[in-house]
């Protein structure tokens, strides 16, 4: 764990807890994997002879059980991880770990059946049947099928064709899959007979389940009751884009920072089922939060005329792309399209000392698509910052050469970046070519 995330609350709340950093979290996760993967090897070395495939089954089983725990922790929305690492990075790690877990579960299942068939001399078919009859195995087998269904829905090609809500519903099957497989983990030969280990394993799962319930269910409910948020106003910003101001009580207690986002659930008959992530597009105040929504699909289109007075539940704040990431005096903000939302909030608030430079480069295809133009110009004048508008489909201004021409001290700056996936990957490559150290790039992705 590294530096504390911030400030003592104006409300008198205690100073916010410590936040996690990538290196520490990855070290802890890999160490856990090493321990989980080594234990079956220790047992195999000390116990009766086991065919190699059996050892593989044991190691992959323990690693899969541990991997599931990691998957759940990464998605528990724990503030320490969300603020320190960022939801997009956690989602990427979750995706990678998910693929590994599915592979390990399949290896474990195939290995266990093959080892049993080899040890007992029965064929693979009969072996499978006998393995299925072992304690807790039928439930684990159903759990494995559910896990495979959820995993198949997450394959990129499948996910593109599914509505977000359908994909999310299928993904929630993972919780059922884990619950069904839990007894099998405790009854497996690597834990059975080792009472202390069984208790530790069960406690680890209980702890993670408690984290999930706390941060994904109880905290949003508590926040809803405490902050009583409602839509205070809806203002058109451009074609298919509106800013929604959300008013509420005690909002300072949320410790929201410019650059962060919430998952917003608008309680209308059409919208209440789904929480959509939207960044803060202005600095939060004690009574108001502002988000800006571009109509993209059903949900964001319905939000264009959400009635004033609608109740809102906001889960968050999330996101690590805040001023806390800054390590240099001069800062470059790069925004593309609706990616301007968090950049506008940062442009308004990033601390700017004497002699420091804050430059915002904002790319849009046409002048009509530029959002907040008047606000941005006013902020630039008020703060002594600079804003440059890059119009047109040409990517040249955001090439390595283009950026170096516009920002000669590029490599000595922090760069904050937000835009469409195509634009951000092109800019990321340009910045790498221009020599920007990776640690100085702070990126918010509008996709998980
Ligand atoms: C961290 C973050 C911050 C964002 N900030 C803004 C912002 O400030 N302004 C803005 O206009 N857009 C923002 N977006 C994008 C916005 O969340 C999506 O455009 C919106 O959820 C689309 O919903 P839909 O039902 O209209 O579209 P759909 O057609 O259902 O989906 C369009 C795309 O959005 C994704 N999406 C849909 N629902 C969700 C959801 N509940 N959670 C995650 N992804 C979803 C889908 O996977 C798909 O890729 C942000 C996204 C993220 C991840």
Image (tube, helix red, strand yellow):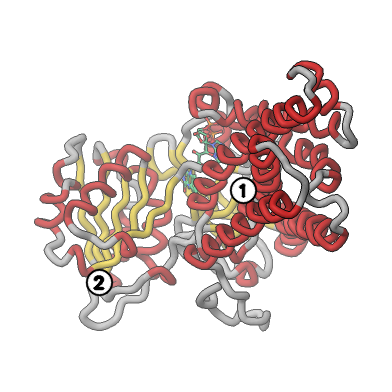
Q: Position of residue 292 (x, y in %)?
A: 47, 48
Give the percent coordinates (x, y) of residue 111: 67, 32
Which residue is depicted at the point 87% across and 59% down?
195
Q: Which mark is residue 264?
A: 1
Mark 2 secondary-structure assignment: strand
Please identify the quadrant where the N terminus is shown. bottom right
Determine the secondary structure under disc 1.
Answer: strand
Report whether 116 appears left or right of 293.
right
In the image as oriented, which residue stretches furthest toward the front? 49
* Count of picture labels: 2
Seen in the picture, residue 64 relative to 103 is either above or below; the reply is: below
Report if residue 262 is visible in the image.
Answer: yes
- Characterize the local packing of mark 2: few (<14), some (14-19) or many (20 or more) Cα atoms within 10 angstroms: some
Asked if disc 1 is less than 8 Å from ligand 1, the answer is no
Residue indicated by mark 2: 330
For label 1, the crowd category at 10 Å Cα-Cα, with few meaning under 14, some 14 to 19 and many 20 or more, is many
Residue at left offset 39%, top offset 35%? 239
Residue placed most toward the observer, 237 or 362: 362
Q: Say the numbered circle drawn on residue 164.
A: none
Q: Nearer the viewer, mark 1 or mark 2?
A: 2
Position of residue 354 measured from the top left corner of the image (x, y, whole percent): 24, 83
């Amino acid at each position: 764990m590294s530096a504390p995330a911030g400030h003592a609350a104006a409300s008198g709340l205690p100073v916010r807890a410590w936040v996690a950093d990538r290196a520490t979290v990855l070290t802890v996760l890999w160490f856990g994997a090493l321990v989980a993967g080594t234990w079956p090897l220790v047992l195999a070395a000390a116990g009766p002879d086991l065919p190699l495939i059996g050892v593989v089954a044991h190691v992959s089983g323990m690693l899969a059980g541990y991997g599931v725990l990691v998957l759940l922790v990464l998605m528990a929305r724990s503030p320490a991880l969300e603020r320190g690492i960022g939801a997009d990075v956690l989602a990427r790690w979750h995706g990678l770990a998910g693929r590994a877990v599915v592979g390990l579960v399949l290896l474990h299942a195939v290995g266990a059946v093959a080892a049993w068939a080899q040890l007992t001399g029965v064929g693979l078919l009969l072996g499978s049947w006998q393995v299925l009859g072992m304690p807790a195995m039928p439930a684990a087998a159903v759990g494995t099928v559910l896990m495979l269904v959820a995993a198949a829905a997450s394959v990129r090609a499948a996910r593109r064709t599914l509505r977000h809500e359908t994909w999310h519903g299928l993904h929630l099957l993972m919780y059922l899959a884990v619950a069904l497989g839990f007894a099998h983990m405790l009854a497996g030969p690597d834990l059975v007979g080792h009472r202390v280990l069984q208790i530790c394993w069960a406690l680890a799962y209980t702890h993670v389940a408690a984290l999930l319930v706390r941060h994904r269910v109880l905290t949003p409910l508590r926040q809803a009751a405490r902050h009583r948020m409602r839509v205070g106003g809806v203002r058109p910003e451009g074609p298919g884009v509106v800013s929604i101001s959300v008013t509420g009580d005690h909002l300072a207690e949320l410790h929201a920072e410019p650059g962060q986002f919430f998952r917003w659930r608008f309680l209308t008959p059409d919208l209440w089922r789904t929480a959509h992530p939207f960044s803060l597009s202005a600095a939060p105040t004690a009574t108001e939060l502002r988000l800006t929504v571009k109509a993209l699909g059903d949900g964001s289109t319905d939000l264009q005329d959400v009635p004033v007075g609608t109740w809102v539940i906001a889960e968050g704040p999330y996101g690590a792309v805040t001023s806390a990431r800054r390590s240099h005096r001069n800062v470059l903000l790069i925004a593309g399209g609706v990616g301007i939302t968090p950049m506008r909030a940062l442009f308004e608030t990033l601390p700017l000392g004497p002699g420091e430079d804050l430059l915002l480069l904002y790319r849009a295809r046409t002048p009509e698509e530029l959002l907040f133009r008047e606000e941005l110009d006013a902020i630039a004048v008020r703060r002594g910052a600079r804003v440059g508008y890059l119009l047109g489909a040409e990517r040249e201004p955001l090439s390595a050469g283009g950026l170096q021409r516009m920002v000669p001290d590029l490599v000595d700056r922090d760069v904050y970046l937000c835009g469409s996936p195509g634009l951000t990957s092109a800019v990321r490559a340009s910045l790498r070519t221009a020599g920007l150290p990776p640690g100085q790039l702070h990126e918010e992705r509008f996709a998980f």
